Image (cartoon, grey):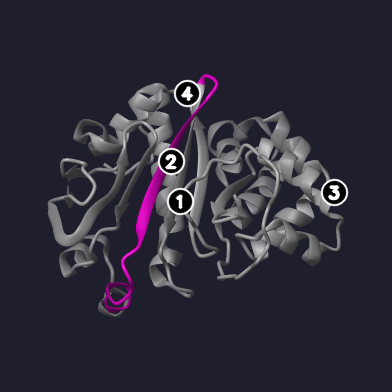
Amino acid sequence: MDEVFKALADPSRRRLLDSLNARNGQTLRELCSGLDMARQSVSKHLALLEAAHLVTTLRRGREKLHYLNAEPINAIADRWISRYDRARVHALADLKHALESIPMTSTDSTDSITGTDSTTDVPRADATAFVYSTYIRTTPQQLWRALTEPAFTRRYWNLEFVTDWQPGSVMAWEGQGLTGADPEQVVLESDPYRRLSYTWHTFTPAFAKAVGLDDDTLAAIAAEPRSKVTFDIEQVGETVKLTVVHDGFEPGSTVRAMIDDGWTLLISSLKTLLETGEKLPDAPE
């Protein structure tokens, strides 16, 4: 965690995080103009923020978009925050809340990045996307199994997927006494140990009743375009970097506003299960 505290210690880097908190998914040019900072300085600060995993970058064509990543703050808060006094706890909790409560607005940019970098060329994402990266002490093979096999998904997600995991195949979501099947619930991409993508589940009256959604909320989310989720897997030394991108939302999407807490808990539970064999104590049964 030394890199996280070092990254947060500099006021310029905090200003960059504030800028992304106000409008996520910005290009380098947008960050420079919005903060009145030299391009070279912004690049150096972003490199340190990326090294601390506080910023995740995704490609959109020739553009490189920058997103806040809450995982390092979650790790501090969830795993060993009790070692610090109450004042520091409150400070970190405020930052954790800020990183997880990001107001998303769409943005158009013509900025292009030249030169080489180490950014993974993940599927295109826009400023309304949920983007979250974490590093797990596991293997790409084991992580793939955890994302696809019922023996794993039942333990941290409380559901299983019924599909052959071939692109174009229909998926059924089964869990908590419900079976959700729809011709538009399909596998989009399946590249074992590297990338998995599929469309999100259908919002049905049975689902709404199970999770306590009222009729108005169900009508709102059922009317939205179907979103999709992508899991990008990358070996990094002795760990595996998992980047989750949930996108395809319209500005002001009700579904987009609902998914943050769920994904944060789900990814933390997946990480804990793979690293310790146990799910999070507060993960749902």
Name the secondary structure under disc 3.
Answer: helix
In the image, residue 126 sits, relative to residue 189, either above or below, namely below
Where on the picture, by quarter, is residue 116? top right
Q: Is residue 29 visible?
A: yes
Q: Secondary structure at mark 2?
A: strand
Q: Give the Cα separation between the discs numbered 3 and 4.
A: 33 Å
Please name the residue that numbered disc 4 is placed on: 137
Q: Is residue 248 left or right of residue 28?
A: left
159 left or right, relative to 24: left
Q: Which residue is mark 1?
A: 123
Q: Quadrant of the C terminus?
A: top left
Q: Residues within 10 Å of mark 3 (few under 14, many from 20)?
A: few
Mark 1 and mark 4: Cα distance apart in space: 24 Å
Contact, mark 2 vs mark 4 (Cβ under 8 Å): no
- Separation of residues labelled 3 and 1 (CA atoms): 28 Å
Q: Which residues fall within the magenta stretch?
A: 219-238
Pinpoint residue 256: horizontal percent, then vertical percent. Answer: 43, 65
Residue at the disc numbered 2: 232
First in residue order: circle 1 vs circle 4: 1
Report which residue position mark 3 lands on: 41
Name the element at disc 4. Answer: loop
Identified by mark 3, the residue type is: Ser
Residue type pointed to by label 2 = Asp
Of marks 3 and 2, which one's residue comes earlier in the chain?
Answer: 3
**Residue 148 to residue 13: above or below:** above
Q: Amino acid at mark 1?
A: Pro
**Residue 274 magenta-highlighted:** no
